Image (cartoon, rainbow, N blue to C red):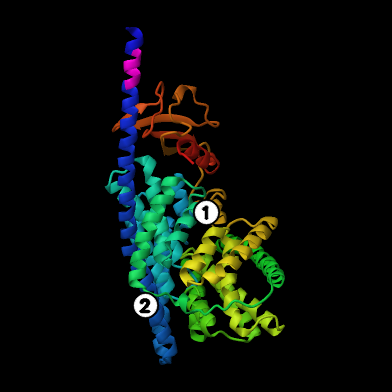
Amino acid sequence: MEPNKWKQKWKQLSNLRKWRIWRLKLIDARLYFVSIFVGLLTGLIAVPYHYLLWEFFDIRKAFFTAHYPWYYHVVLFFSLWAILIGVALMVKKMPLIAGGGIPQTRAAINGRIHYDHPFKELIAKFFGGILALSAGLSLGREGPSVQIGSYIGTLVSRWGHILKGERKQLLAAGAGAGLSAAFAAPLSSSLLVIESIERFDAPKTAITTLLAGVVAGGVASWMFPTTPYHLINAVSPGLSFWRQAELYILFAAVVAAIAKFYSLIVPFFQRWLPTLKLSVYTKMLYLLIAAYAISLTETNLTGGGEQFLMMQGMDGTHDIRWLGVMILIHFVFTLLSLSSGLPGGSFIPTLVTGGLLGQLFGLVLVQRGVIGYENVSYMMLVGMVAFLVAVVRTPLTAIVLITEITGHFEVFSPSIVVGGLTYYFTELLQIKPYNVLLYDRMFRNHNPEFPEVEGARYHLYVEIMDGSYLDGKEVDKLTLPNNCIILSIRRDHKTLPAAGETLVPGDQVEIEMDAKDIEKLYEPLVSMANIY
């Protein structure tokens, strides 16, 4: 009878396991449905954010081209100054809304930071970003859109009582949906999460991000049926394979060298400006003087410079010296804007810099009789990919993004070649990704806004998937990395002590670790609970 009892018990456990796996599939279906809802909400908020930025840009451009009397400018100048001061004070009160938002989103997914007041910070990020760019600062909409999406993912996960092990998927889905809403590019939004935010491919994250991105991208496409990038006419130069290879190697090397300078000078300015100990009023005054001066002379160069790039792509200048001066002005202005700490991303200014460098390289080739003027815009698109790869170090995102937003599939193949070459050169030059530099600056440089407490411990929540490494393992017999401890297991709506338990699919496992190790251990620990 004993063997029969054992067989019966084993059969019961086997049936229970099968039921748990089917139940997990239903839970996954719920998660995917919720991610679609996150994408819809993100699109309904991030797309109006994009729309309002364009409207404010058009209003500002109309004002500066209308030649109003001088006293109108006095009123506008002091109004914008007051706005920038207000935004700066708001950032001081809520430091998480500073800058683009991609490093903050990654920190939230990793568990480094927590959105204690996500709704309030979402509102502040939304209006802070609009107001900062309304003054003409050289900032982008993509970073704030990503963080807005992560805030929405946080809120939905709380409202929907999503398990802690799955909340990071909704944060990532919201982040991807934010980028998709900014550019109407769902595929590249998923790639950004994988390459830059979560930094590895978890199946659930990829699916939830893509679902949310498609929905948010659909909302963006409905609001903006055509993007101005489609108006850029890119004509491929009729050069031999070897001639193109020579040019692409040269261009990739030049872009990597410029990116190396960029990766050194931007963090330097961001560290150096606070040491001047200027008041908020003085900082915002200097910044506005620069923005206003550029608005009076070349309005399209403000607001990130996207409008200027598109105008150059459709009907660009042939004057190399003038374009070189514009690139320099845009670069310095972007440097000042990013160092201000006001809400706004670096993605679009980076795209603009890369596109203008590509145009400059193309004009030099025209001058030497290598290509024709009709091929310059082609080089511009390749330059956008190359510089984005060099600075942000996300080759897949850069290649797919430019293809998605421009619709020029003929640039796809050369973008792969130039992107790959640029990535190789950036490896040789040891260029650290810009968002990683910002992330490290948040926690590794004794930032008073995000203090690193000595000996601090962080909690990571992972979900055990069927067939994963941790599936079926006894907690007491598990060998985890140094100082990692499984504290508790959430199973069937109950929290169980980990000691003596055997892990089964669907378990939400709470792992405690040293705070300083979370970046190194996040991927391995999540991988042990997932299937790849």
Q: Residue type at mark 1?
A: Glu
Q: Is residue 111 visible?
A: yes
Question: Where the N terminus falls, by quadrant?
Answer: top left
Image coords of residue 395 (percent x, y): 57, 59
Q: Is residue 485 left or right of residue 505?
A: right
Q: Position of residue 442 (x, y in %)?
A: 52, 52
Task: Give the numbered dot on residue 460.
Answer: none
Q: Are marks 2 and 1 in contact (CB under 8 Å)?
A: no
Task: Find disc 1 in the rendering and name its residue.
Answer: 195
Answer with the quarter of the image where residue 390 lies: bottom right
> Pointer 2: residues within 10 angstroms few (<14), some, or many (20+)?
few
Residue at image coords 68%, 71% = 244
Segment tinted magenta in the rendering: 6-11
Location of residue 369 (image quadrant): bottom right
283 relative to 80 in the view: left or right: right
Residue 336 seen: no
Q: What residue is at 58 percent from the left and 76 percent from the top?
A: 378
Disc 1 secondary structure class: helix
Work out how far the residue at label 2 is from the one at label 1, CA to CA, in angstroms.
32 Å
Above or below, 434 against 107 in this view is below
What label does residue 55 carry, if any? Answer: 2
Kind of residue sitting beneath label 2: Glu
Residue situated in front as seen by the camera: 113 or 73: 113
Does the stretch in magenta take in 283? Answer: no
**Above-or-below relation of 96 to 351:** above
